[in-house]
Image: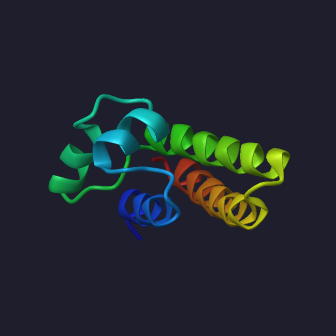
Amino acid sequence: MNYLNYTYKKLKDAGLTTGFNDFSRRFLMKNESYARTIRARQKDLPLPSLIILTARVSQSSQNLLATNVGRELGEELGALAQELSEHVYKRALSGG
């Protein structure tokens, strides 16, 4: 599975990102063209970027849960963060 596209779509559908430029800056902590470039090359994110993405999704989940405003979305993002975390763990064990 391509976690770049998968996570982007989930966050876009939830209204938490406006496009790939925003996604690159806010969730990957990279320049605006980063996600578009990886996507154009039909690659998945490198492990360090996946780790950052996992942390940012988890943080967004916790923020939503703490405010109790977006509880359902917070829980969905928590599940997504857990899924990303498991993927990161498996990739790390396999050597990248």
Q: Position of residue 47 (x, y in %)?
A: 46, 43
Quadrant of the image containing the N terminus: bottom left
Taking the view exactly as shown, the residue that stands out farthest to the front is 69
Left or right: residue 34 compared with residue 10? left
Depth check: give the residue in front, 3 or 7: 7
Count of residue discs: 0
Q: Position of residue 34 (x, y in %)?
A: 27, 38
Depth check: give the residue in front, 76 or 45: 76
Quarter of image, res 39: bottom left
* Residue at left offset 39%, top offset 44%: 23
Depth check: give the residue in front, 75 or 67: 67
| 77 w.r.t. 57: above or below | below
Q: Position of residue 73 (x, y in %)?
A: 68, 63
Q: Position of residue 57 (x, y in %)?
A: 60, 48
| 39 w.r.t. 14: above or below | above
* Residue at left offset 64%, top offset 53%: 85
Taking the view exactly as shown, the residue that stands out farthest to the left is 40
Left or right: residue 43 compared with residue 61? left
| Colour pattern | rainbow
* Residue at left offset 80%, top offset 52%: 65
Left or right: residue 30 compared with residue 64? left
* Residue at left offset 54%, top offset 37%: 52
